[in-house]
Amino acid sequence: MAAANLHPSKTTESPVDPRESGTQLRPGLWQTINERYPGSMITKSEFIPLARLAKPLKDSTVCLISSCGVHLKRDRPMEVAHPLGDFSFRRVPSDARQPDLIIHQLKYPHDDADVDINVIFPIERLQDLAAEGVIGGLTRNFFSFIGYNMDPERFEATVAEGIARAVDEEERADVALLAPA
Amino acid sequence: MSVPYLREAVKDGDSEKLIRFVRLHLGDGNENGGRKEIDKSWIEALKTLLHDQEPDRDFIEQTMQKDSSTLALLYFRLHFYFIRNSGEWIHDGSR
């Protein structure tokens, strides 16, 4: 659905930004973001189509990937002070529990996630689904990074491709569940 | 602000764009808030030095031998360190 159809009252007041046309972006989002962070909104002209599920979920190994920045307490915290962002990611063992995990973040409130990590990184719910046989199992590791960064090209070459390669070649996942923060 | 935008500002000597970016980063997206935050961290550093505790100058000398990239990130880290010490936290995320 085009953005223009989501908020017709707003779009009648101002024309749809051509950069938002045909997308699901909230009307005006592009301009709002670019007033604060010029150049940070990007588009991609080429898309890799979503892969179809090769086998039923009950037989599939599931991996969780999130931009929430969660990591094991013993791991180095994400670099939240760097003005350009952190271009690394963390492996989170899929058998980790709430007391093992922590979020260090500047850019979004995570008070509720500190109480129950599953609201943003549903690791224990996936453990439940695996135990109940709803899904075939979990990859050994899940993945986490922080979404704030000012260099989309470097981000794609480091974090995105690094995680994609690990999920495919190391973890042999059948399904990747993406959870944005 | 993307890295190409910032590099172009550096190339053009456009300090206004650069300081605006720094203020937005330190002010959690609020330029005026960022200006106050910068002042706040310096005030907190000054207040700390007024405590008369002798600084570890050897540590400082050793640290100052590090590369400029490490020192630049340390500079940002120290900003947030002093902001935390101030007791006033404007950011959405963790202290």
Image: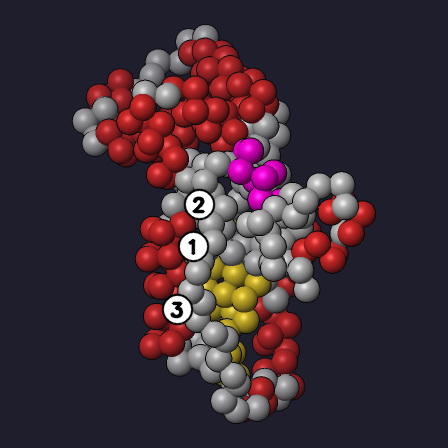
- Pick whichever, A124 or B4, lies toward us: B4
**Colour treatment of the image:** secondary structure
State the count of labels.
3
Q: Which residues are magenta?
A: A29-36
Marks 1 and 3, how far apart in space? 24 Å
Marks 1 and 3, the one that precedes in the sequence:
1
> What subunit carries mark 1?
A
Q: Is residue A142 above or below residue A20?
A: below
Which residue occupies 38% across, 76% down?
A168
Which residue occupies 39% across, 68% down?
A164
Marks 2 and 1, how far apart in space? 24 Å
Q: Residues within 10 Å of mark 2 (few under 14, many from 20)?
A: some
Q: Residues within 10 Å of mark 3 (few under 14, many from 20)?
A: some
Q: Which of label 2 and label 1 is nearer to you?
A: 2
- Pick whichever, A126 or A4, lies toward us: A4
Q: Amino acid at mark 1?
A: Arg
Task: Find disc 2 in the rendering and name its residue.
Answer: A149
> What subunit carries mark 3?
A
Task: Find disc 3 in the rendering and name its residue.
Answer: A164
Q: In the shown orientation, is residue B44 left or right of residue B76?
A: right
Which residue occupies 43% across, 24% down?
B17
Asked which quadrant contains residue A6, the reply is bottom right
Q: Main secondary structure of the magenta part?
A: helix
Asked if marks 1 and 3 touch (Cβ < 8 Å), the reply is: no
Q: Is residue A98 above or below residue A27?
A: below
Residue A92 in percent (x, y) is at 46, 64
Secondary structure state at the residue bearing disc 1 = loop
